[in-house]
Amino acid sequence: MPNPKENSSCHKVYITTPIYYVNDVAHIGHAYTTVIADALAIYSRMVGHDTFFLTGTDEHGQKIQEAAKSRGKNTQEYADKISGKFKGLWDDFGISYDKFIRTTDQEHKEGVQYAFAKMFDKGDIYKDVYKGHYCISCETFFPKIQLVDDEFCPECGKSTSIVEEESYFFRLSDYQDKLLQWYKDNPDCILPRSKRNEVIRFVESGLEDLSVTRTSFNWGVHLPEHMNDPKHVMYVWLDALMNYLTALGYGTDEAKIEQWPARVHLIGKDILRFHAIYWPAFLMSLEMPLPKHIAAHGWWTRNGEKMSKSKGNVVDPKEVADAYGLENFRYFMLREVPFGGDGDFSQRALIDRINSDLGNDLGNLLNRLIGMSSKYFAGVVESDMLKKYYKVELENMQNSISKLEPLLFEMQIHKYLEELWRPLSIANKAIDQYQPWTLMKEGREDEAMALNALVANILANVAIMLHPIMPKTTDSIATALGFRVSQESYRNIIQDNKLLNKFTVEKIPPLFPRIEEVVLVEKIEAEIKKKLEPQENKTDEGIAIIGIDQFFQTALKIGTIIQAEEVPKSKKLLLLQVDLGDGDVRQVLSGIKEWYSAEELIDTQVCLVANLKPAKLMGIKSEGMVLAAKDEDGLVLVRPEKAKKPGTTVS
Ligand code: MSP
């Protein structure tokens, strides 16, 4: 990005968000990435760059197929519905995306097939057999050493399954040195820079070839028809990453592709490996230029915990925006947390930012200007005398403003906003120090008018530079000051340091009415309380104390094992058929093979959790859980002391 003082010529700026999985609805984490990207896009357009802002949804893969199935829905219809919700939310939020891509779009699928064929023809993709531990939830294979307890995913903690299948592989190992060279030559390719070091260490430890097709499910992009291998669908990350190119017409409409390379791919830190290793390697293989920045932000947590639907602590961005104002929320997210770091969502912090930064520093300054100019000058503001009396203040302000742009595209957004508040403090201090009421009393009208003009010009500069973060609010400020935020006013006021023409201040209602605690969103408050309560009600071991009603929500029953067998390829699992009486026979997978043989279990009784949601392990359905006790001496099943009728309730 050029320095605006030197050059305003038009550049192509392509900005992307990750494409969001459609197995869940949007939360604050998604809103955060999208709002940052939106701010960059608005800024870039205001500067006059040819800007293209892409967002969308990631709709293929086993995870989505299973999410649809568990809800009894057709996969495409399910994807349509959730994708529509994301789009609807961004439209509600006024997000200025230029294209909303869906990986189920026909052009996208064709583009991915085109890329696959290109990499295959080049010799970068070959066919072999893959065997490994696969986490469906993360759609990723993990080497055994990375698994927790030899079984669980190191990222999400869910059970992995062993997948052995014929697969096409991408020669990622061939790109190790080229990738390292790229990181070395481009210190800002991964932001923040500390994250780049992590990536370098990972790549230096050695890259294995990457399995890029699957045969175990079919909800994905198929291989190009001429490859005649219909049972393969593409690995969801190859499919998903390609969206950044296919959205521009890659593989279907080459004429549009000139918007490439991306100026910045905005992502969360959990998907950095895919973007900083796989993606540039794919691009190198396709002989395409590499993105300028891959910028990874941190995580939003709630009371220090990761947000998840099952914990019930997910912050719904729409609820927060409705309660506190969308633009206040945008400001808060971008100001509160240094880019790259994690941030805890707190309503208290949000209210403080609104009342203090926005209300006191910005809103009050505008009110002071409206008050002073209408009281002393019938609302008129003239900048003629400004440089004569307040040159130093003016230059200090302009100096602060000129530092801003690089901060934005280096993803130092919180610093950008911090720096942007300096001019506001210059203006507020000048009023306190020079006191327009005293100046008027002493007959120094020119100085009072110049002071008004200083405040108005500072507000104009701040409004323009704050526009990307708070577009509507700053439009209102500009209206009060008699101008519009546009490429033209950006050029005049920010680039050329022009002062405002004579204007009459328009009185507008206060922009940031003070927020008292009573307007807190009740639902969110109730959730916080709910989260806090069990913490007060915990045993010394930190286990939640529950009421009898909660206990009775678990259906515990006596069951007789009528059949037991080993699960092929599993060291831990036995497959049991447990009779609960009245023809209710449950198929249950249990990790007890180390302690029990299949034969010795037949005709014995167990205690079964009978109302667990069915789950799949290694592709086999399990409809309950057998209770067992385990200590350092091993594991024993919990059984009734004497035989009981199958189906007897345990209470
Ligand atoms: N579909 C992939 C991305 C493919 S891009 C080619 C994906 N989707 S996601 O919906 O699971 O996540 C999208 C983004 O949301 C990621 O950047 C992720 O880091 C971000 N967030 C998800 N939860 C988050 C928080 N709690 N806080 C901040 N961002 C988080 O990954």
Image: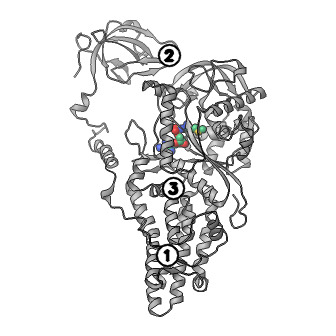
Between 485 and 460, the residue placed more toward the observer is 485
Q: Secondary structure at mark 3?
A: helix
Element at label 2: loop
For discs 3 and 1, the disc positioned in front in the rendered view = 1
From the image, state whether disc 3 or disc 2 is nearer to you: 3
> Is residue 563 shown left or right of residue 294?
left
Marks 3 and 2, the one that precedes in the sequence: 3
Residue at mark 3:
334
Taking the view exactly as shown, the residue that stands out farthest to the right is 122
The residue labelled by disc 2 is 570
The picture places residue 48, in percent across and down from the top left corner, at 67, 59
Q: Which residue is mark 1?
A: 505
x then y, percent, for residue 371: 43, 78
Label 1's element?
A: loop
Frontmost residue, 372 versus 415 = 372
Write the residue at 30% across / 43% down: 530
10 Å neighbourhood of mark 1: few (<14), some, or many (≥20)? many
Q: Amino acid at mark 3?
A: Leu
- Res. 13 visible in picture: yes
